[in-house]
Amino acid sequence: MITLKNIHRNFQVGDQLVHALDDVNLTISAGEYLSIMGPSGSGKSTLLNLLGLLDRPSAGSYHLNGRDVTSLSDIEQAQVRNQEIGFVFQMFHLVPRLTAAENVELPLILAGIEPAQRHAQVEAVMQELHISDRSHHKPDQLSGGQRQRVAIARATINQPKILLADEPTGNLDRKSGQDVIHLLEDLNRRGITLIMVTHDAEIGQRAQRQLHMMDGAITHEQSA
Amino acid sequence: MRIQDLLNLTSRSLIAHRLRSLLTSLGIAIGVAAMVLLTSIGEGVHQFMLAEFTQFGTTLVGINPGKATTAGTSMGAFGTSRPLTIADAEALKRLPYARAVVPLVQGNAEVEAGNRRRRTTIYGVGHQMPKAFNMAVKSGRFLPDDDPTAPRAFAVLGSKMRHELFAKENPLGQRITIGGSRYRVIGVMASKGSILGFDLDDTVYIPAARALSLFNNESLVEIDIMYAEGTPVDKVVKGIEDILKARHGRDDVTITTQAQMLEVLGSILNVLTFAVAAIGGISLLVGAIGIITIMTISINERTNEIGLLRALGAKQSQVLTLFLGEAVVLAAVGGLAGLLLGVGIAQLLHIVLPELPIHISMFYIIFAEMVAVVIGILAGVFPARRAAKMDPVEALRAE
């Protein structure tokens, strides 16, 4: 499903060239549960952004479902992000002036779906994540765990094949964090490919495949 | 993205910052109001001036002695132009489309009636003057169609002159003395007001031939011809030239058509209105800078949101549209408020100062609103492009 070959990502910081990713090779099959661990600056977030088509590699190739996606135009990449990839962030990134339901609706609005169909989809996914009673609340009226649930609902509204989670529990207390992890794992069991970046070893170890990164390279891989 | 969703999203973010949006729109509103108001006054003055000039009718041609051109060599003795005479005026009556021909002499003389005296402007004219100049006789009658070279000594008073000389008495049939000659008053004109400083009410009209001898003049000051409506003005001018050339032996008169005058006047007044609109435009410019400022601030504050939208699958063009939409809505709403404000103030001015000529032009109203929208686009495009071009990773990471 995902094939990365000789991926490099360099940043120019001042007069220094930083190798955020240094010759990364990785293959991920559909339905896998993968965690990426490593200290900060090891390149794990860069790798995740690259997988999510938010960033382009400096060199190397990225095939998604057999298609080379590195050479896609902005419009095509946006389409792939909208339809095939879901993002969950540490900071939730909910739009503060929109209600929970409207936040979940955003990807559908961007895709130009009719309102009637949108509302049915939003209602269904919020029911599934047990937040339908919160649908008219603004983000600041929700607890951290609820916010992350809304964010997950938003990430999965288009039924993407891949869910990318960047420290999804980083801003949550232990209890809500566990809830969120269980929720994500539940989605994985139902077929979604889950790729999670974390520096929390306890959470990372739950994944079937665990990648460890250091200085922009995958140092070793473990399987549970 | 559907257009309703675009409008909904943009208005939601504007409403989230009510005060800020209101103040930014106010900048545009003031600009548009100023533009509406200034152009309304400009248009009012425009129409007022045109009305002043066309109150004598638009199918008028004036003929003055002498050629208003500069020749290379002195014409010497032949250079002096021949006078315009009453016989010339009579000859011009032969023009088939001439509805009225009015010889005109003008001068100052003392008018006496009983023991009252008044020094004023005397007009020597032909009997067709009321017809040519759209003027009405209030009582009595105008000068009769006498033999133009030896007319009877009749006089017609302007309305102000009538009051100055006769107060409450009936002037008709009374004798007055003008420059030592005696005249009989046979009519009083309706009030015409003053035109560009000439008071047409404070005057006496007498036959042109008598005025020539009164002022010891050889030449008429002017001959005015009213031609039939619909006649091409070129044909009229050509006809006049032919007749006078035959009589004078050469082309030695200046012909001014009302159409020419109106054209020149119209273009001057258009420049005036445009200049006034440009002054209003400056305040719109200030409003536009307000939009740029607020959009730049807004985009800095919402960097995260831009990153998020990109992650959710927004194209660069969609991010651009969203922010451009906000700028356009700010400008359009401000523009509408400005229109209402401007029209309101214009109406108020009209009530408070009825003499001030104000004309609210639909053209400028639509123009002002379109300018507001265009300003919204121009002011919004720079910040919106910056938002669209942001690196999504950087944007998501921003504090």
Image: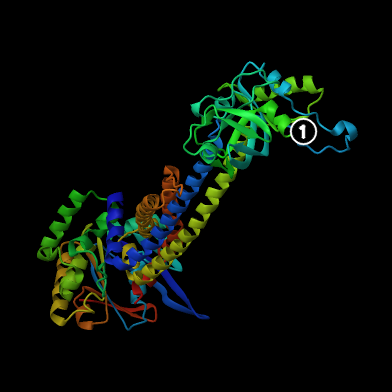
In this view, the residue in front, B78 or B376, is B78
**Residue lying farthest front?**
B115
Whether residue B61 appears in this view of the structure is no
Q: Please state the horizontal and vertical placement of residue A44, each as a whole percent of the image.
A: 33, 76
Dot 1 surroundings within 10 Å: few (below 14), some, or many (20 or more)?
Answer: some
The residue that label 1 is drawn on is B66
SS of the residue at dot 1? loop
Asked if residue B252 shows in the view, the reply is yes
Relative horizontal placement of residue A219, taking residue B39 as reference (left or right): left
Q: In this view, does A129 lie above or below B39?
A: below
Residue A86: x %, y % from top left? 26, 63
Identify whether B220 is placed above or below B246.
Answer: below
Using the image as rendered, state which of residue B370 and residue B229 is in the foreground.
B229
Residue B88 horizontal side relative to residue A205, left or right: right
Question: Splitting the image into 4 quarters, where does residue A90 fall?
Answer: bottom left
Q: Which colour scheme is used?
A: rainbow
The chain letter under disc 1 is B
Residue B365 point in image, percent of width and height: 41, 47
Q: In which quarter of the image is the C terminus of chain A?
A: bottom left
Q: In which quarter of the image is the N terminus of chain A?
A: bottom left
- Residue B297: x %, y % from top left: 39, 70
Q: Which amino acid does label 1 sit on?
A: Gly
Tag count in the figure?
1
The residue sitting at 53% across, 81% down in the picture is A15
- Residues B227 and A11: in front is B227
Q: Which residue is drawn at the image coordinates 13% and 57% (left, top)? A: A124
